Image (cartoon, rainbow, N blue to C red):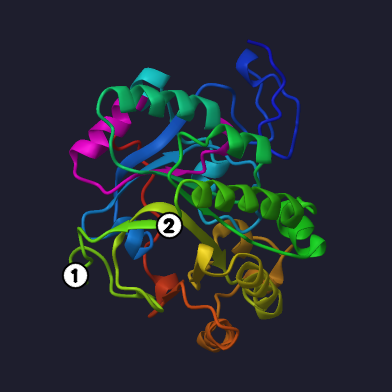
Amino acid sequence: MDKECTICPRGCGVKRYAGQKGYCGETGTVRVTRAMPHMWEEPVISGDKGSGAVFFSGCNLHCVYCQNKAISDGGKGKEVSISRLKEIFLELQDKNVYNINLVTPTHYAYEIKEAVSLAKKEGLKIPVVYNCGGYESVSTIKDLYDTVDIWMPDMKYISKETSGKYSKAPDYFERASEALKEMVRQVREKGGTQFTDAGHFTGSKDKKPDNEKCISDKVRIMQRGVIVRHMLLPGNVGESKRVLRYLHEAFGNDIYISIMSQYTPMPQITDSDLYPELKRGVTKEEYERLVDFAIRIGIEKAFIQEGDTAKESFIPEFNCEGV
């Protein structure tokens, strides 16, 4: 195959299936860096048994502050066939995880679609989570209608200046908001957000740190729905408020919002003088201001983080475990 890649808004036109690398840094051959039960997602995703996280190599955003730079453009990962990817999904299900959590899947969307279809024929029954940076093409999201049950995109920015500076994507909000509208439309069409009462999170310290709580609902396991993540950046409370206001006014209770405080300055930031404003973590006061704002404007279906989340290991070791 020598088709030019237009899978994401970058539209870089690279012939990835002929072995060329796209903006994402990857060819058309799937690479996975780790596949394991993951305890550090939102409670409705990880519960007390874990989410079946599959971390893919590469990314179509390459944010300057990337928390997973080791895999987004660090060259790590093992090549896998579609048949092997199908097996990984089934192996994770056998470990009693609550879902298959596709982490940074955008550039492999169609390979994933095929692998999920094959896995379902062999007994895959748990929901599939599309855990992405939000910078998606509506056409690709439409093509995943029968593949994805839970959409978990980021909504990183609103301003063109900020998204251009940190992600070289001045059209980020335009594209991310269009994609999110399609995600929400699909969930509505399928019957709306759905949970199961099975697998309540107990808060057991040996399984998941008690640092993330839902503002309103009891912790249940999501089967279908949309969770939009927003990570507060240092000194960026104003823009974050704009993001939360947009999400609440545009989608209301049709989505859950995960308000994240875990930003950690990574080596590519601390070892450089290009982004001095990002060399520190988010202060408690900054995060509290943002959470208070969310409550004040009426956001109820949201997750907030408590404790020193930036000091805890939300980043697993990418050692190809389970691949």
Q: Is residue 110 found left or right of 323 in the rendered image?
A: right
Whether 191 is drawn above or below 271: the answer is: above
Q: Which residues are magenta?
A: 86-108
Along the horizontal axis of the image, is 48 left or right of 19? left
Instruction: Label 2, secondary structure: give it.
Output: loop
Residue at screen point 48% across, 69% down:
262
For residue 193, which numbered disc appears in the image? 2
Give coordinates of residue 140: x percent, y percent.
Answer: 62, 35
Residue type marked 1: Thr
Q: Residue at x 53, y 78 (%)?
A: 299
Q: Nearer the viewer, residue 90 or 163?
A: 90
**In this image, 104 relative to 12: left or right?**
left
Q: Position of residue 256 (x, y in %)?
A: 48, 65
The question of residue 233 being in magenta is answered with: no
Q: Quadrant of the N terminus?
A: top right
Of labels 1 and 2, the one closer to you:
2
Across and down, in percent, residue 259 comes to: 51, 71
**Tally of marks:** 2
Q: Quadrant of residue 8?
A: top right
Q: Is residue 190 left or right of residue 202?
A: right
Helix, strand or loop for disc 1: loop
Label 1, label 2: how far apart the Cα atoms are: 22 Å
For residue 103, say whether it is visible. yes
Q: Could you say which disc has been placed on residue 202 in the image?
A: 1
Q: Does 312 appear above or below 1?
A: below
Residue 53 place in picture, x, y as percent? 36, 45
